[in-house]
Image (tube, rainbow, N blue to C red):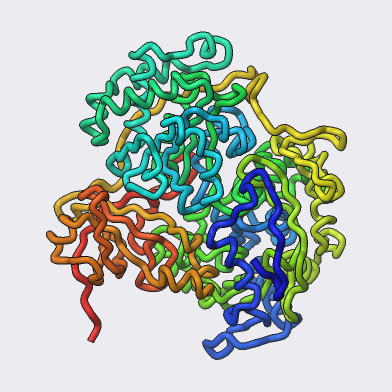
């Protein structure tokens, strides 16, 4: 990689071993991209036109003040992102609740890791994606990857699975034969939306084949009997009829995990992004608990996080129900503690707000927000049923977007604020194993660009807040975050920039300046008051929208190697866009033939909510009842035009991973 014409020397870092994927080694190109925003834009006469920073911030502040004065503080909402640094996520939550006074704040991480987070809280009493260092995986004899495709989404991660792969212990659950599945000794290819049934079948096999760790269950868990009462009815042959996964393979998974000296169960978006995602992840945690894996050195359960700060972004207050330190906003003690740090009355803090999709769906309605501020997210492409979300945005009295490029969401805004990106600012991130990392400024920002912290400061002061309440320096914000998180589940109070600069590897919780951090959770006890993990009784119910005669196929969505999230940034990198320049749809050749399609044809994939235009790729290994679409593309290529906003009752995660569709040739415009 090169920054500003100078080569950057790689260093050996344990998580990625010095490796980068294509997105990583081309990231420098975005710093000088012609698509970079370098001046505020204000909509005038229907068009976005350049404006000064003072004019833009004055306008935004006056419009916020006007909306809240007329309709109350909840008339303005804030939407954050899992790619924001810890400092930005923290200050964004504080800005929403103190400077605006709104309860209406959530973030795009609700669309990523929320079901695994909810399941982890329920089972273990705390949510840290991987409660052990990633490097522990390198010694594993067996790894069960459920709904994960790291060979494309995070290639450096694959090096940690080399030993399990060599031992014949890498097992992948995915309805597609992905590049990750190609490397597995065993690939289970269940029907979309049936992962929970598969987990029940494997749990049944663990018990029936004599692999249950009864001593571990007695000492370290509760709730097994209730969970088993349901799983007992899901014998592998019954599960085979529902999932399509052979009963023998279910028993083989149970056997390989049980016989391994060091084994892990890891989940990701494929099994989480469902209307029953929390229960589905809970079912896989039940499998891990039945084998005595969590809380044992060299084994465990973990969630592979999906965004740059996917872990830290969900800890410090940009979620609808949360205060810093992973505290609950409806906890009186948490409110008192954080209010004292912020210098406000606890009674002045709003309560829980709407979750991400519910917030977007309420925009412009009689009881919903009339203004929206977006930081680090591109909801026009990334939200489910995105056509409806775009319609809701069009009803707003005020839409403000802070971004570094003119994303599809920014293009619809009334005000666009250009902000810095990764190499131009200091800040911390918390990686998938709970380690806090210091990302240091390498380059000055272009003229006309400000940090998100400076934007929040400028707006807060204009809204009547004391200037010192909203610092602009990342380290000053982090010092306040330390105090706000102290005593919470995600306790950063012992982390400092000085310790991070010195190279200390600090995994939260770090409750004191001399505390070494906690790289491995649960070795002695789980985080519930009794110290025990919880089995949760869960049952299979299937997808929210099963196929029928009108929509006989199922669609699933995901990422490709060359692009990331909504693609707003990676589509501007010529090297990446040249490889995957447009949306495509993977289809089994027989399914394509029945639809009158061949490889390279332009297809229309239609659901009850909309239609996507995509180029056909015939894939013989794909299930004939399934089509796959990447979600990185805009306009008529948006995969989320067809996805269903059925929400998990606990996590409020939408069901991105399965919906009913039909396939046909796309009409070519004349």
How many discs appear? 0
The reply, left or right, for residue 525 in relation to residue 267 is right
Q: Nearer the viewer, residue 21 or 71?
A: 21
Instruction: Determine the residue positioned at 12% across, 59% down.
Output: 594
- Give x and y (percent) for residue 602: 25, 71
Q: Give the residue at the far front of this rendering.
A: 166
Residue 439 drawn at (x, y percent): 74, 56
187 vs 656: above or below: above
Image side of residue 579 versus residue 664, left or right: right
Q: Quadrant of residue 641?
A: bottom left
Q: Residue at x 87, y 34 (%)?
A: 514
Q: Nearer the viewer, residue 599 or 61?
A: 599
Answer above or below: position of 37 versus 312.
below
Q: List x then y, in percent, for residue 177.
A: 33, 47
Question: Please, is residue 405 above or below residue 281 in the view?
Answer: below
**Left or right placement of residue 165 versus residue 85 in this view:** left
Q: Quadrant of the N terminus?
A: bottom right
Asked if residue 293 lies left or right of residue 173, the reply is right
Residue at x 52%, y 61% (from the top left corner): 368
Q: Quadrant of the C terminus?
A: bottom left
> Do we see residue 391 in this rendering?
no
Q: Is residue 58 above or below residue 607?
A: below
Q: Quadrant of residue 419?
A: bottom right
Picture coordinates of residue 200, whole percent (x, y):
35, 26
Residue ID at (55%, 46%)? 157
Q: Residue furthest bottom?
A: 45
Q: Is residue 271 visible?
A: yes
């Amino acid at each position: 990689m090169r920054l500003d014409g100078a080569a950057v020397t790689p260093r050996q870092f344990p998580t990625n071993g010095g490796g980068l994927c294509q997105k990583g080694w081309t990231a420098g190109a975005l710093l000088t991209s012609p698509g970079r925003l370098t001046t505020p834009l204000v909509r005038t006469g229907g068009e976005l036109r350049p404006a000064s920073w003072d004019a833009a911030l004055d306008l935004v502040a006056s419009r916020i003040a006007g909306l809240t004065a007329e309709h109350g503080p909840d008339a303005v909402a804030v939407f954050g992102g899992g790619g924001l640094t810890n400092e930005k996520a923290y200050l964004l939550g504080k800005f929403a609740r103190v400077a605006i006074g709104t309860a209406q704040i959530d973030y795009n991480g609700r669309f990523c890791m929320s079901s695994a987070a909810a399941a982890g809280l329920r089972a273990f009493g705390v949510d840290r994606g991987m409660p052990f260092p990633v490097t522990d995986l390198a010694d594993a004899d067996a790894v069960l990857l459920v709904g994960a495709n790291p060979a494309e989404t995070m290639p450096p991660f694959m090096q940690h699975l080399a030993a399990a792969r060599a031992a014949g212990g890498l097992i992948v659950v995915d309805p597609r034969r992905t590049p990750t599945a190609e490397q597995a000794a065993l690939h289970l290819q269940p029907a979309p939306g049936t992962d929970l049934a598969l987990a029940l079948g494997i749990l049944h096999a663990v018990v029936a084949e004599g692999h249950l760790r009864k001593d571990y269950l007695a000492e370290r868990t509760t709730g097994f009997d209730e969970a088993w009462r349901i799983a007992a009815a899901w014998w592998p042959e019954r599960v085979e009829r529902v999932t399509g996964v052979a009963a023998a393979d279910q028993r083989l998974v149970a056997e390989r995990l049980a016989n391994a000296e060091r084994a892990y169960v890891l989940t990701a978006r494929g099994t989480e992004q469902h209307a029953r995602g929390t229960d589905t992840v809970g079912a896989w945690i039940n499998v891990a608990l039945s084998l005595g894996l969590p809380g044992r050195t060299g084994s465990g359960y973990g969630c592979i996080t999906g965004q740059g700060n996917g872990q830290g972004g969900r800890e410090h207050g940009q979620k609808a129900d949360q205060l810093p330190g992973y505290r609950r906003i409806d906890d009186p003690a948490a409110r008192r503690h954080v209010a004292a740090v912020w210098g406000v009355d606890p009674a002045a803090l709003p309560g829980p707000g709407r979750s991400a999709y519910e917030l977007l769906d309420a925009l412009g309605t009689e009881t919903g927000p009339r203004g929206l501020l977006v930081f680090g997210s591109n909801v026009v492409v990334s939200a489910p049923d995105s056509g409806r979300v775009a319609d809701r945005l069009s009803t707003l009295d005020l839409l403000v977007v802070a971004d570094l490029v003119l994303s599809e969401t920014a293009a619809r805004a009334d005000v666009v604020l250009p902000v810095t990106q990764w190499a131009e600012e200091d800040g911390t991130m918390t990686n998938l194993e709970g380690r806090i990392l210091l990302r240091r400024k390498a380059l000055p920002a272009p003229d006309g660009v400000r940090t998100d912290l400076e934007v929040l400061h400028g707006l807060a002061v204009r809204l009547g807040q004391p200037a010192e309440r909203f610092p602009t320096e990342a380290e000053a914000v982090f010092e306040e975050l330390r105090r706000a998180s102290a005593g919470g589940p995600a306790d950063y109070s012992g982390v400092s920039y000085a310790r991070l600069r010195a190279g200390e590897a600090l995994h939260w919780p770090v409750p004191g300046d001399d505390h070494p951090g906690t790289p491995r959770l649960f070795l002695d006890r789980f985080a519930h008051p009794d110290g025990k993990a919880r089995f949760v009784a869960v049952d299979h119910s299937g997808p929210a929208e099963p196929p029928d005669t009108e929509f006989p196929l199922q669609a699933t969505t995901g990422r490709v190697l060359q692009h990331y999230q909504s693609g707003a940034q990676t589509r501007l990198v010529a090297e990446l866009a040249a490889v995957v320049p447009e949306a495509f749809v993977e289809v089994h050749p027989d399914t394509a033939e029945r639809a009158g399609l061949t490889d390279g044809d332009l297809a229309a994939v239609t659901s009850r909510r909309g239609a996507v235009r995509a180029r056909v790729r015939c894939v013989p290994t794909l299930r004939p009842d399934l089509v796959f679409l990447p979600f990185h593309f805009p306009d008529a290529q948006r995969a989320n035009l067809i996805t269903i906003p059925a929400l998990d009752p606990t996590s409020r995660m939408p069901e991105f991973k399965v919906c009913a569709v039909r396939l046909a040739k796309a009409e070519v415009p004349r």
